Amino acid sequence: MNQIDYTDNEELKSRLMRRKDELSETLSEDEMRKAYDYCEPYKSFLNSAKTERETVEEAIRLAADNGFIPYEPDMELKAGDRVYLNNRGKAVILAVIGTESLSEGVSMVVAHSDSPRLDLKPNPLYENNGLAYLDTHYYGGIKKYQWAAVPLALHGVVILKDGTTINVTIGEDPADPVLCVTDLPPHLSVLQMKREASEVIKGEELDILTGINHIKGAGSDSVKLNVLKILYERYGITEADFVSAELEAVPAYPARDLGLDRGMIGAYGNDDRVCAFPTLTALFSAKLPKYTAVAVLADKEEVGSDGCTGAQSSFVKDFVSDLCENAKCPVRQCLKKSLCISADVITAFDPIFPEVGSVSNSTYLNRGVAITKYRGLRGKAETGDASAEFLAMLRRIFDENKVSWQPGEAGKVDVGGGKTLGRFISNLNIDTVDIGVPLLSMHSPFEVVSKLDVYMAHKAFTSFFDRDCFC
Ligand code: MN
Ligand code: MN
């Protein structure tokens, strides 16, 4: 313990109390400019990666630009080699091989590739009173009323019976039409306004207005037929092809600078692109790490991480096992010595709704990445709960590398809560902690983050991949 002058109140304060940095107050102009510059390609990433498939495609495109090559199971790998493994176009693992043996573990950062949205049902198209609609089943935890009266674009794939993949994007090109879900006018909403908020717009009311013109003289259902004709002309698809399609309606507008000072980014899909992008850029900056650096973008987080592309599938463990097998190293040894950051957003304190925040334990925009020991709900259920030892190591690394960070929980105890995929990685016997960017309006069509926090996520993950110690 260092000696403190107990009679000096200022010294007492600075030595004993944790500093809370408002980053726009404490960062240098130069560092702020770096952060703002960093966010320009991030906004492009948001615009080109609105779905899990697009996120993976974009990640692989960027990885290839940064010297990554497709991973083959029997590859001879040496320190500094850069590989990626595409899991069904919806999840991806990327790795930079370290100088240390795999028996010393890997450094892993796992973000997710999916976001809440409206998915088309298998038989989506119908006509009602002269209007054509696409029937949807929403994906992830949304406030359904937020998705009405918002311009929507349609993204996804249609796989034809012969296996041909048709990529669909409607509504992103400014010359394209957009779609939307309609809402009642205030004038006719006396009954609707009495509904519970979760039912203001019901799940079955999230149908997307898609067309209005008949094919002249074609009789019943000719508005629907006209939509099918347009789809056939543009994509060569028919109604039956919807069955083997994954079409997702997402907000049609691009990411924008937010605030007169341009300090924030408003966009659809910040959860979890805002961690996925820094995960990638941090990995790209790892040249010759001591521990093998692994980045994962997993799918299906928003619905519980199930399925073969979700973090509960064996694909992450299989990849590490393959690396270990090739290196003749016991995989169990590698897993137990590995460390993982589960990189996901966390709800920030919202001054407009202070009643749900925990004054001293919320996270705040512009105070850096949030370190969250545990997520979960109902008395810390369904969380991995990071070890104090791991947290101590990260504090040290972050402070040494001038990463601005803050500890925090998502809100008051028992007002709600959230889970991340971190627990599934920790179930592999890997020490895992939740670290991510604080965010406002989570799961809405326009999520808000601070640019300085985005940059701090990049710095945090970079310093983690650069670690030369185990906790
Ligand atoms: Mn989410
Ligand atoms: Mn998330």
Image: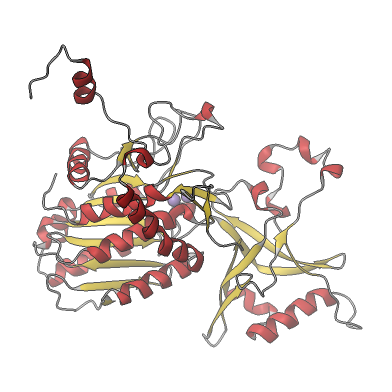
Residue 249 visible in the picture: yes
Query: Which residue is depicted at the point 15% across and 62% down?
Result: 289
Query: Which residue is depicted at the point 57% across and 83% down?
Result: 160
Q: Where is residue 290 shown, x and y percent of the image?
A: 12, 60
Q: Is residue 433 above or below residue 39?
A: above
Instruction: Identify which residue, 66 or 11, lies in the foreground.
Output: 11
Q: Where is residue 307 shown, x and y percent of the image?
A: 43, 61
Q: Is residue 253 left or right of residue 294?
A: right
Location of the C terminus (image quadrant)? top left
Instruction: Identify which residue, 439 or 249, lies in the foreground.
Output: 439
Instruction: Identify which residue, 180 or 219, lies in the foreground.
Output: 180
Residue 312 visible in the picture: no
Location of the N terminus (image quadrant)? top left
In which image quadrant can residue 411 be found?
top left
Query: Which residue is depicted at the point 17% across and 41% down?
Result: 396
Count of numbered circles in the view:
0
Q: Where is residue 83 shown, x and y percent of the image?
A: 25, 73
Query: Which residue is depicted at the point 16% across and 11% down?
Result: 7
Q: Is residue 302 above or below residue 224?
A: above
